Amino acid sequence: METIANNRCFEGEQLRLAHRAESLGCDMHFSLYLPPGARAGNVPLLYWLSGLTCTDENFVQKAGAQRYAAEHGVAIVAPDTSPRGDEVADDPEGAWDFGLGAGFYVNATEAPWSRHYRMYDYISEELPALLARHFPVDTERASIFGHSMGGHGALVIALRNPAHYQSVSAFAPIVAPTRCPWGEKALGHYLGPDREAWKNYDTCELIRAGALQLPMLVDQGEADNFLEEQLKTELLEATCADTGYEATIRRQPGYDHSYFFISSFIGSHIAFHARELEKSVSDD
Amino acid sequence: METIANNRCFEGEQLRLAHRAESLGCDMHFSLYLPPGARAGNVPLLYWLSGLTCTDENFVQKAGAQRYAAEHGVAIVAPDTSPRGDEVADDPEGAWDFGLGAGFYVNATEAPWSRHYRMYDYISEELPALLARHFPVDTERASIFGHSMGGHGALVIALRNPAHYQSVSAFAPIVAPTRCPWGEKALGHYLGPDREAWKNYDTCELIRAGALQLPMLVDQGEADNFLEEQLKTELLEATCADTGYEATIRRQPGYDHSYFFISSFIGSHIAFHARELEKSVSDD
């Protein structure tokens, strides 16, 4: 592991690191914010999963999250959004919604994608173990959130691993990738034509299949250009209504899909997770 | 004037605009954050001047300022850092510290720079008039701040126009451009070899020449790689000590020159200006 940047920020440290990712078979970068409280002992951890085209840097530069992380004494790790490197297969036409920058947080089963595209394992297994080994974070007290494709990733990973996360939240998530163009393209390539296999990576399907209740918060901008065709928040609302799954789903008038939207509510999300992480201590 | 972007942010509006700048003789972009309070009437205005290589977008995306601007009910305008366009002369070697992205907030007097490089007039005259005409801002209640080259610009423009700004602040400003490589290169080209003319654009020289007292706040990171050779905060400290000019100059241990530094203290600067702008109302 190599530290490639270290900037003091809100009295803590904004780190950028490079390492060999075994699950992905390539070198990866990730960013990690350590609040000032991490100098005194292990702190709880938030995983942030970014959306299409992003690297580990967008969130760190644009969300304004460090202030809230410092206040609440939580670390935030922001991984990249796909495997990287010359040897990693990409969309043959260089599309931005598939391949590099668009790993969709799945374990691909189809060639050539299955060789490197194992972001599900990377986020849910390799990264927690790596962080616990090298940094003052308590990976037993963790929550997960993300934006768009990363909101999908956060919801899916939390719903499939409810014992590993105290809470989950998302900004403008793709809630039903089995039923939107972005998701159908990505899952079709990564997982092949059998749509049954896709359901393991679909938030609405996982809830309908009986996923355990987790504290869940979703914000969706009503001026988001992707809402109707790709994000389909109404499918999550209907799924929760049908199943009794409790989620706070907030439609925010006037907000779009950008980081200006994320920055406006990131403080609310971090406070939400901090409350749930605090409860996890009280429960002990 | 054309609105080229409008994103809701902290219940206000983050705008990006394009217009013909008469003082610069070219088309320019600038960004303007309007807090939610601007829907009810004119709000006070902060001018943010960015540093070398920046456009009007860096601050808007990276500083996390909108939250504080919304809270305090102030607008923030972020202009570009030089004239722009194919017809605008640039450093013949394409250097990043001179020419495009490096206007140094002067009115150039030397050819070929004098044709377009008139950022001093643009910031101090054209932009205020334009904003007053088109937006719900009160340009009579204004303060100014900036970073690095933009910290220099903010200090110089405020010191030369003390009636137009309630307060001034800077992050890692170039306090003595007549005595550092960045400044000597820029002022030498823009203003010619007569160093007497340079003094009108040097914060320390303006204070020594008897500039009126304004509320002034400066933050400087002690891990800033440019501190020793270019920024020379100690010259401002000595100038203030010698002349009795009152300024709050804070050295911040561990912080570097990046937006992670700016974002950590931007809230403190906006609160400082908001307090001074509030006083200006009480004085009326």
Image: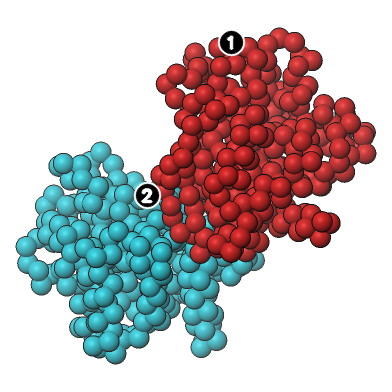
Chain colours: A red, B cyan
Q: Is residue B100 above or below residue B202?
A: above
Q: Position of residue B55 (x, y in %)?
A: 37, 49
Q: Residue furthest left?
A: B193
Residue named by callout 2:
B55
Q: Position of residue A195 (x, y in %)?
A: 76, 14
Task: Locate the C terminus of chain A by quadrant.
Answer: bottom right
Q: Residue at x 63, y 56 (%)?
A: A42
Q: Quadrant of residue A283?
A: bottom right
Residue named by callout 1:
A111
Q: Of circles 1 and 2, which is in front? A: 1
Q: Position of residue A175 (x, y in %)?
A: 75, 32
Q: Chain of mark 1?
A: A
Q: Chain of mark 2?
A: B
Badge 1, how many Cα within 10 Å: few under 14, some, many 20+? some
Judging depth in this view, the residue of A17 and B128 nearest the camera is A17
Mark 1 vs mark 2, CA separation in Å: 43 Å
Q: Quadrant of residue B47?
A: bottom left
Judging depth in this view, the residue of A85 and B59 nearest the camera is A85
Q: Residue at x 58, y 10 (%)?
A: A111
Where disc 1 sits, the SS reads loop
Judging depth in this view, the residue of A247 and B28 nearest the camera is A247
Is residue B65 at least partly visible in the picture? Answer: no
Q: Residue at x 77, y 32 (%)?
A: A160
Amino acid on which the number 1 mark rests in the picture? Ala
User: Marks 1 and 2: same chain?
Assistant: no
Judging depth in this view, the residue of A36 and A225 nearest the camera is A36
Is residue A281 at least partly visible in the picture? Answer: yes
Q: Residue at x 48, y 32 (%)?
A: A20
Where disc 2 sits, the SS reads loop
Give left or right: position of B39 versus A232: left
Q: Is residue B6 above or below residue A116?
A: below
